Image (tube, grey):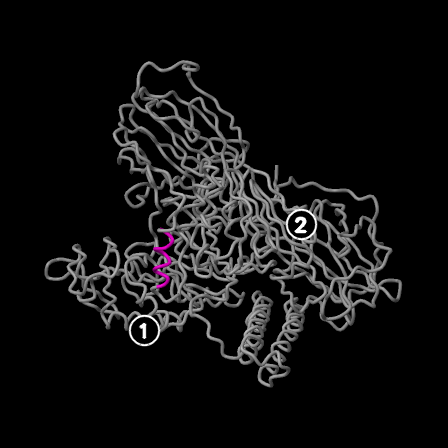
Amino acid sequence: MSILRLNPLLHQCRTENPRFLSPLNFSTKSLNFSKLKPLRVYPIRAVLSETALVESDAGAPVLFSERFEFKRTQAVEGTISVRLEAAKERENWELTVGCNLPGKWILHWGVTYSDDLGSEWDQPPPEMRPPGSILIKNYAIETPFKNSPSILEGQILHEVQINFSASSSIAEIHFVLKEEEVGAWYQHRGRDFRVPLTDCLDKDDYIVGGERGFSVWPGILGQISTTLLGTEGSRLKEGDNTSGSKRAKQNQRIEGFYEEYSILKEEHVQTFVSVSVSDSQEKDKNLVHFDTDLRGDVTVHWGVCRDNDKRWEIPAAPHPPETSIFRKKALQTLLQPKENGHGSWGLLSLKKEFMGVLFVLKLNENTWMNNMGSDFYVPLTNVSSLVANTSLEANLAVSNAAYTGGIINEIRNLIIDISSGKGSKIKNKEAQEKILQEIETLAAEAYGIFRSSSATFLEKPVSDIEDLIPPVKICSGTGSGYEVLCQSFNWESHKSGRWYSELIDKATDLSSMGFTTIWLPPPTDSVSPEGYMPRDLYNLDSRYGSMGELKILVNRLHKVGITVLGDVVLNHRCAQYQNQNGVWNIFGGRLNWDDRAVVADDPHFQGRGNKSSGDNFHAAPNIDHSQDFVRNDLKKWLCWLREEIGYDGWRLDFVRGFWGGYVKDYLDATKPFFAVGEYWDSLSYTYGEMDHNQDAHRQRIIDWINATNGTAGAFDVTTKGILHSALQKCEYWRLSDEKGKPPGVVGWWPSRAVTFIENHDTGSTQGHWRFPSGKEIQGYAYILTHPGTPSVFYDHIFSHNRDEIAALISLRHRAKINCRSTVQIVKAERDVYAAFIDEKVMVKLGPGHYKPQSGPQKWVLAVEGNDYKVWESS
């Protein structure tokens, strides 16, 4: 069966005051969708309509035509199989992992030995490794699948066969699958597949084979673009006569088994929507014709407008058949299936008194398609003067210019008021500050409108705004307050060798989802391929791509309105040369430092600098930032990155290793738009249980922020840790501190808290501190509705979680939640947490019941999913 999945794009209708609305950040008075649920996957099917919408005028000349192209995601169903059986030689066994879907499949695997049953993998012995296997660090190997002559449902089976001795000391084989062409990883319920080879292991729901059946859920490794389904796999056992009895001996070898799991591999295919305008037989009307290759329940959600403000309006009846009125703000008309079944079509008859028609497409209850965050717009007046297939970008530029023109006029009037001192109310300092705050808000609106536009239309309006705004001291590195951050890589991203190029293709997609800022991987030459062991700082040819590709990527991100953070490692640096004692502490490249640049109290690298101002990182020489020449060189390098590459700010690695005052020095020199430090520290535990009071932990993070003089934010590790326990153990009371505030850094200094639930260290293939499996969206429902600056991990964006994340980001922009928003916690109990944010959004987490009471303030359910709901004030 073929399954169609379309990524929902955000939709809005402009209302009474359109100049304060942007395509991606619009008023709560705009059209809201109630009961927005997680995207469901539907089988493709044709829907018949008894009546045509409008009869087309044959031979009528086409006055205007536009074709909009998109990428849709189509999932192909297949199976993963796992077989354990005795080989022909009785003393040997064979484990065969297979897949019947096309692609470049890789088995990422390792083993656990009987004398070491920890959670860490080990590499298998050489005689167990199939030909073509590649060593991955010191803990795993990767083996490519090979085509097998076996046929499964008419498709060639790809498989890996692992042979091992029955007398081996190996207790378990661990593995995950990777489809290398798209970087998709497949796991078992978010964890490794575990194949036990002895019965001395504790059985759990993650064991493969044996008597216990299990479900497969999406993994979160690598670039996840797939969904694993199938809660029941078919299972055939060979010679299993142990059912219902306990085995007599420990360490006895298990019997063979065969398991299968359903899997859906997503493929991207092009789709289109064409709209044309032609004359009707009625002189005062035009016909608008829709044509698309989309099938199923395709609905045009539409309205008309009379001027350039593009306010949605419902035309007077009669309306086409199969049309309903949506909340008195728009019409919804169901398209008809084409006779050949290869798409849908429809016609609208509209009076020429209207200037244009605005629309979006609705595919099902939760899937909407629009034009890069904006409504589709088709002109109805003077269409004969337009050239067919005119780019919609020009039309959007005109409309955006109209919106921002009004905003700029408002800013100009407010500044004139300040300078001329009109009225007694603006003569005092307090009133002037209020006016400046309003100017800042208006400028943010203008920025939001142009965030998804190209640079061609961005330069002049932004420069005008900058010239008009009076000098207001803004703390460097803290952003505008409305940022939504995307970590654009994981621990495996370097392996493709062309990660920058892959991100170029995703730039528009990330912008349309509502991300304002992107965190790129470390750019420098590095001993480790991931980039966190830098060597020659001015050499920007890395495993992610070349310096030229990096510059193209940054330029592309800027064009779609996304600011860019560079990941810079300032704490340590790998040396190129050894000293006379054979110690690696002499550096090369443009920054050819000697051992005076290394701290004196790092015993591994015999530095001649001063003592460290922080914790040592023992894998590489720790840099002595107290040295003037070191700080000056680093400031020049950071400024060079800003100018040459175009970075707008920094993600600072391992800032526990040096004093925050040095960070202030670097930020003062480079004046970044946004900066965030990785200050990682352990939370407080008593007898293995997390303490409720984590004030000491968040205080240490805030002490570092204070040391930077507030010029940088920090990742809110406290909030991540508390969410772990609250969600995993159903202890939602943890989400309120003793004073009724959020218990993390976000509760004490929200404008400096960068909240997150996962990153390349905690998740991906490292999995050092993985977020509770299946609870990820609850975590995002928390951080995307609360103050602070939320950061979303790449693996979660391109996964089955994408649609819910996009809906939550849209709500955040719509409600104008920012890093300084207020939180009023109304419930923090065992099974439920509920809070109001800015009195505009209400969020509920947990299986317990809570629903906001409607009174003068009406609440509309905007987003919901597994154990969470979010309402908007209407």
Q: Amino acid at mark 1?
A: Lys
Whether residue 104 can be seen here:
no
* Extreme-right residue of the structure: 282
**725 or 448, which is in the foreground?**
725
Instruction: Measuring from the top left, give residue 268's x and y in whole percent.
Output: 56, 49
Give the structural element (helix, strand or loop) at label 2: strand
**Where 720 sits versus 457, above or below?**
above
Instruction: Measuring from the top left, give residue 339's x and y in whole percent.
Output: 76, 46
Q: Are marks 2 and 1 in contact (CB under 8 Å)?
A: no
Please check the rendered image and state whether residue 786 is part of the magenta-colored stretch, yes or no: no
Give the structural element (helix, strand or loop) at label 1: helix
Instruction: Measuring from the top left, give residue 575's x and y in whole percent.
Output: 22, 61
The residue at which mark 2 appears reads as 860
Q: Residue at x 30, y 41 (%)?
A: 139
Circle nearer the viewer, 2 or 1? 2
For residue 636, which numbered disc appears in the image? 1
Q: Earlier in the sequence, mark 2 or mark 1?
A: 1
Q: Residue at x 61, y 51 (%)?
A: 8
Q: Amino acid at mark 2?
A: Val
Rendered image quadrant of residue 40? top right
Q: Residue at x 59, y 56 (%)?
A: 810
Please check the rendered image and state whether residue 701 is part of the magenta-colored stretch, yes or no: yes
**677 or 202, which is in the foreground?**
677
Q: How many marks?
A: 2
For residue 276, which numbered disc appears in the image? none
